[in-house]
Image (cartoon, rainbow, N blue to C red):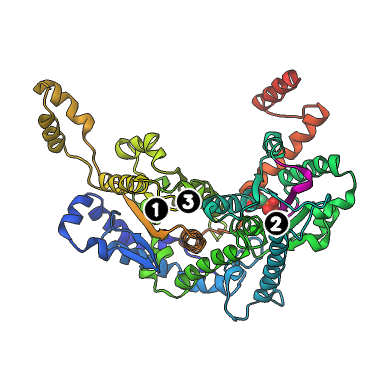
Amino acid sequence: MLKNISPTQTNAWTKLQEHYKQVQPQHLRDLFAQDPQRFEKFSLHLEDMLFDLSKNRITEETLDLLTDLAEETGLPAAIESMFTGKEINATEGRAVLHTALRNFSDEQLGVDGENALEEVRDVLQQMKKFCDKLHSGEWKGYTGKPISSIVNIGIGGSHLGPQMITEALKKYQKPGIEVHFIANIDGTDAAEVLRLVEPETTLFIIASKTFTTKETITNAKTARSWFLESAQDKEHIKKHFVALSTNTDAVVEFGIAPENTFRFWDWVGGRFSLWSSIGLSIACALGFDKFEELLRGAEAMDKHFRSTPLRQNIPVQMALLSIWYTNFFGCQTHAILPYDQYLRLLPEYLQQLQMESNGKSTDRNGKPVTYETQPVIWGAAGTNSQHSFFQLIHQGTVLIPCDFIAPAQSHNPLGEHHPMLLSNFFAQTEALMKGKTADEVRAELTQKGGMSNEALEALVPHKVFAGNKPTTSIMFKKLTPYTLGSLVAMYEHKTFVQGIVWNVYSFDQWGVELGKQLAGAIEAELLQQKAGNHDASTAGLINYYSQNRS
Ligand code: F6P
């Protein structure tokens, strides 16, 4: 179904290896000096969003060859297979249809004998009705008071997306509703949230695709016990617990009423699920209309991705750039640097999206890959990050491609804060690109004066910046639900494209399953206080715990 070809076997790959030798020694400063049109040539647009790729170590030929690589590895057909619901998640025998969750067209999309789009719309209606009741105060807790606190209990894709989006769109938050998140099995997470809320005015959203994830079920049980300590009667659970899941039987077994269950489908991957009922906490926090705007923004990016030629296609080019750095420059990490405090959780969200999807070393033939796949994703909001790890990006020994992301308008235009914030964004990308030569440093120090020539020369090498550090700048007018939807969908499609070219299956996560199994076995030993057969280190750690547990 998906083309099964090692990227290294393509003509484009061979040409890119040769081409790399020509591009690698070139300095971005020179490339800009040679071509006044460089910014225009390497900028891509979608509505008010700007993707400036010009500060990357590329020429037009680079993007042409990378685009050939995408063609040769079968990307156009793969995109169509995804959008039309083919079983491209072959290791789990599933379609991959998160795009159906934000498809407002009247397309027919048959999956498992059902029209997926109709099913999606039914659940969206259910969510809308629920939000309306919640926000109008019609939905009441067991003492008759309206709900004022929402607690989303979920982990991974059932947590990171909703948390990142509600934080990013805090400015749109409905008054009178606070949203909290419990994810970690560490009891501290639940304890600290439960300290902030009241049983009679709190609604728990239990978000779990499988409804078997230990963290979530344990936290949900803790929340239920906490609630029943006050409410006493189990009948009250239905006013305070709802579930978001594909596993409706397990939800009912847990004690949540079927009418309080918002379903979704196994063709929605956990890390791609914020657009499904998993986004209920978002809709509760912002209102359903804002949730719909988020979906519409994602739909705009979907349409662009599906219909734009690869060479002008934003997610495709973003993915190919990452492949260029990973597979030809040997970069092992990629930094996400939002210059917007509201987007501070974006790096964490993108870690799961990209690293859980493409952190694979087996190709679609079941053979070990012979090339690098997903780089480590990391990052933090600017300008805080400038005062922690930017030193290494500027002057360290590793090359780190970075995405700088910022809105032109702030939601909080206090004094000169926003121009000051953006001046840092622009200055950093410029400095990373240009660097500073020894002559420039010398001239600067001489002008400053007060230094012997000897002292000046000793200082020069420490103040030299090589520059030539690649950055991609992403800007948009304002951080709205619509824009955020487009931005997140762009990163989803980027992830998909990388997986196609790297010839891996991006939509399973077997690596995470092992940890789940191992922890289960040791957990039983800890509870029974009976150590099993382990290596010396693990046995030593278990013993340390046993001796110090109380
Ligand atoms: O970490 C593995 C994983 O399966 C993720 O892919 C998923 O988002 C998370 O666990 C939570 O799973 P669930 O929604 O089924 O509780």
| Residue 481 pos. (x, y %) | 52, 61
Amino acid type of the residue tagged 1 in the rendering: Ala
Q: Is residue 26 visible?
A: no
Instruction: State which tag comes first along the sequence, 1 or 2.
Output: 2
Amino acid type of the residue tagged 3 in the rendering: Gln
Amino acid type of the residue tagged 2 in the rendering: Lys
| 546 or 272: nearer the viewer | 272
Label 1–label 2 contact, CB within 8 A: no
Provide the secondary structure element on which disc 2 rests: loop
| In the depicted structure, whether residue 410 falls above or below residue 197 | below
Residue annotated with mark 1? 406
Q: Which mark is residue 209?
A: 2
> Going 90% across and 47% down the picture, which residue do you hit?
233
Residue 392 shown in magenta: no
Relative horizontal placement of residue 367, taking residue 252 as reference (left or right) = left
Marks 2 and 3: which is nearer the front? 2
* Residue span colored magenta: 197-211
| Residue 377 pos. (x, y %) | 47, 46
Marks 1 and 2: which is nearer the front? 1
Q: CA distance from mark 1 to mark 3?
A: 25 Å
Q: Quadrant of the C terminus?
A: top right
Residue 208 shown in magenta: yes
> Going 52% across and 74% down the picture, which residue do you hit?
80
| Residue 234 pos. (x, y %) | 89, 49
| In the depicted structure, whether residue 136 falls above or below residue 536 | below
Q: Is residue 270 visible?
A: yes
Q: CA distance from mark 1 to mark 2?
A: 32 Å
Provide the secondary structure element on which disc 1 rests: strand
Relative horizontal placement of residue 410, taking residue 267 as reference (left or right) = left
Residue annotated with mark 3? 374
Say which quarter of the image contains residue 105. bottom right
Marks 1 and 3: which is nearer the front? 1
